[in-house]
Image: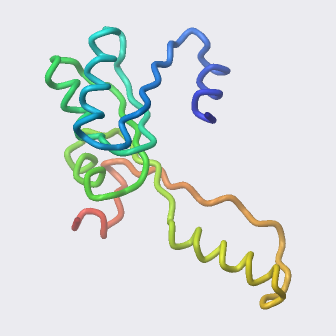
Amino acid sequence: MGFRSAMRARHPERTLVEIAGGQGLDATQYDLVRAALERDPDIRAVYSIGGGNIATLRAFDDLGRECAVFVAHDLDHDNTRLLREHRLSAVLHHDLRQDVREACHIVMRAHGALPPAGPTLPSAIQVVTPYNMPAQATAV
């Protein structure tokens, strides 16, 4: 919702095409993306909050279409490979271990097991591109 809101506020002239229901599965994602691409020849970029990114790119390829910009979430095995191949422009990544650690600290503070702390900061988001991939990600 944040992405849609920001895009509509900053670029109201752009049309956003939302694809839902793929559950991050390649088989269903491919069909949904291909249908959207066939309906709208102006689609040139993707912002994906879920999986199915390989299928999304395959739909573009099968229709001979360029995906000029592709931003995905999470530095998983598929996205790491796609970044290495320069098929993704960027991946928005956050450290889930740090999120869980912070959640545990909040619960522990609420029960008095840890001293009070200042305000809780939002999770840090890393923007990972093919040019700044962490060393451990390139070994995947």
| Snapshot colouring | rainbow
In x, y percent, where is residue 31?
A: 25, 26
Answer above or below: position of 121 versus 89.
below
Q: Which residue lies furthest to the bottom in this view?
A: 113
Residue 20 is left or right of residue 105, and the answer is: left
Residue 29 is left or right of residue 62, and the answer is: right
Answer above or below: position of 119 versus 42.
below
Question: Residue 8 appears in which quarter of the rendering?
Answer: top right
* Total count of labels: 0
Answer above or below: position of 38 versus 111.
above
Answer above or below: position of 91 versus 3.
below
In x, y percent, where is residue 96?
A: 51, 66
Say which of 30 and 3 sits in front. 30
In x, y percent, where is residue 20?
A: 44, 31
Say which of 45 and 89 sits in front. 45
Question: Residue 106 appears in which quarter of the rendering?
Answer: bottom right
Residue 1 is left or right of residue 106, and the answer is: left
Going 29% across and 43% down the picture, which residue do you hit? 25
Going 14% across and 23% down the picture, which residue do you hit? 62
In x, y percent, where is residue 132?
A: 37, 55
- Quadrant of image for the N terminus: top right
